[in-house]
Amino acid sequence: MKTKLISVLALLMAVGATAGDDVAARLAQMPRPWTAKPNRFTLAEYEATLRYWAEKHAGVFSFEKRGASVEGVPIYLVKITDRRVPDTDKQVALITATHSGGERTGATSVMRFAEWLLGSSSEAVETRRKQVVLLMPVVNPWGYETVESPFNSQGIDPYSSQRGKAWNLDTLTLKEPAKNPEIIAVQSVFDEFKPDVQWDMHGVALRWNGQQVVESCGTAYSNYSLRPWDWRITEAMIAEARKAGYGIDRGEADTQRLFFGPDMPPLADRLWLGRPFFYTAMYGYARYHMLLGTAEVGWEESGVARLRGLMRIGNRVWDGEKTAGYPVNVVKSLVGQWLVAAGRNATEQRRNRVELWQRQGSFTMGVLYPQTDCRVGLVVAPTAKGAKLMDADPKKFVAKLEAVPGCDASAIRAFLEAGPETKIYYEPPDRAPEDRPLDAAFAFRLRIPYRNPKLLDLRLNGRALHQSPTDGYQRWYGDGYTQVQVNIPAEKARGADLFVVTCAYKPDVQRTYGWRPPAEVMERLKAKTK
């Protein structure tokens, strides 16, 4: 082929051909995928496929009508999971294509992913056993088949929800529900299943075969708030796409730009083009601490590869964790110490995560400060009564604890007096503390920066703790830390207004502090003083 092209070019030059002739000869070798008819499934084909899969894979596949457009076109929800395995300890993942009015490859990638998930590969089988996977391939059916538009017939984009203008954020309710049946359908899935993760698939309209988009993962170009909180999730998905032969854009990272901020309009031309908005998916985050992300899909197999990478995260143990699942259970933190949802299984953890997430804004949290090696002190008040006990002065704080039932103030005093810290640093709550008791199992996570330290003394409210996965402590090494988790069962949480965790440990290695100049420098300084 190369020799033939050279011959053609030589002939063109001999007869005085123009540059345009040269280009035409070169482009004659170029494939023209746009000359073939694009594969765009119809809604009739879509519904017939769902019915076929329900018949063929009755043990793992089901679907239901979750809503309808204003015109009455059905909006379907697909559920894929191994029904022989109880759902109690399964993760819940929701994959949507909310822009699948105009962006058809988002919908087609979800359908291809469904095919993979229904397949016989070991990873598909594992995913069905460990997760409930929910799919909404065509969220905007009217826009998909009628006008090829991201908007419904009322002018609403189910994906962006008019960049948040469709919502009353004070109450997290829609301003005009009648105009937003597509958003209501997605919202109902959030409310019923409270997914651990939701990923939204985007793409192109397939107006012609071969229509493309720059494939991206994790970020939305228009909205830098719409992304997972952990870049490692995005990178794990991108790694799967790269294995399959696809390059994935990382948005602001590949563009090498910082994010925009409220004080930065004069620098807008040097900042990332995205801005923070409230999109529909963020309802799931705001209500249920749901992990979320997006992906642009040009080639469906690339989209499937990335979703396989996402499923693998839910099937495996995340860095630093003890059990498998998506990293969604940290609901509050202060300078490296965490408050996490706990429970005997995934269902309990999910329920407790939702309760804690909706309450954590009213918690008062504090740490012993300045932080000191060999010691950790953590204080959390989940109620208004507990918040009144807080005091930055360690001595005054302990004096208040004398009157707290079930609290051994003398043990806490001994711990505080044994260290050099000067105060208890508190982060004030974002809203007024509540009077009602907390009804959720949770845990405090202390991360000790040593591989195998000896726990010399570990107490909750001054009382020694014993190892227990439900009412006591656990320890394991992960992500560079010895993770020490103090588990609080719901019945203990209901009766307490304040929790004080104290931990003293002996490191397994000796580390030094400070830096000294070279000996020669010290000698010169010494000589100058003589």
Image (tube, helix red, strand yellow):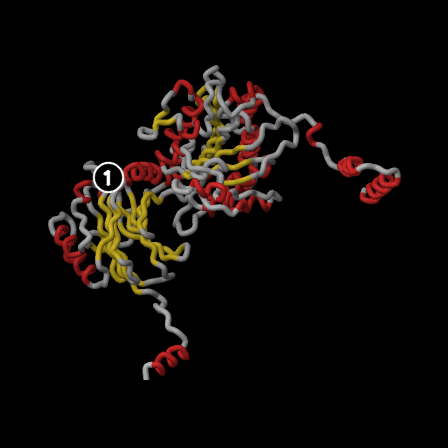
- Residues packed near mark 1 inside 10 Å, few (<14), some (14 to 19) or many (20 plus): many
What's the amino acid at mark 1? Leu
Position of residue 102 measured from the top left corner of the image (x, y, whole percent): 55, 26
Q: Is residue 379 above or below residue 181?
A: below
| Count of numbered circles in the view | 1
Q: Is residue 411 above or below residue 304?
A: below
Q: Residue at x 73, y 35 (%)?
A: 31
Q: Residue at x 75, y 36 (%)?
A: 27
Name the quadrant of the N terminus: top right
Which of the two residues, 215 or 380, is positioned nearer the viewer here? 215
Q: Residue furthest top?
A: 71
| Residue 11, quarter of picture | top right
The kind of secondary structure element at disc 1 is loop
Position of residue 438 measured from the top left corner of the image (x, y, whole percent): 24, 39
Q: Residue furthest left?
A: 403
Position of residue 491 measured from the top left corner of the image (x, y, whole percent): 23, 41
Which of the two residues, 425 or 439, is positioned nearer the viewer here? 425
Q: Is residue 426 left or right of residue 267?
A: left
Residue located beneath label 1 in the image = 438
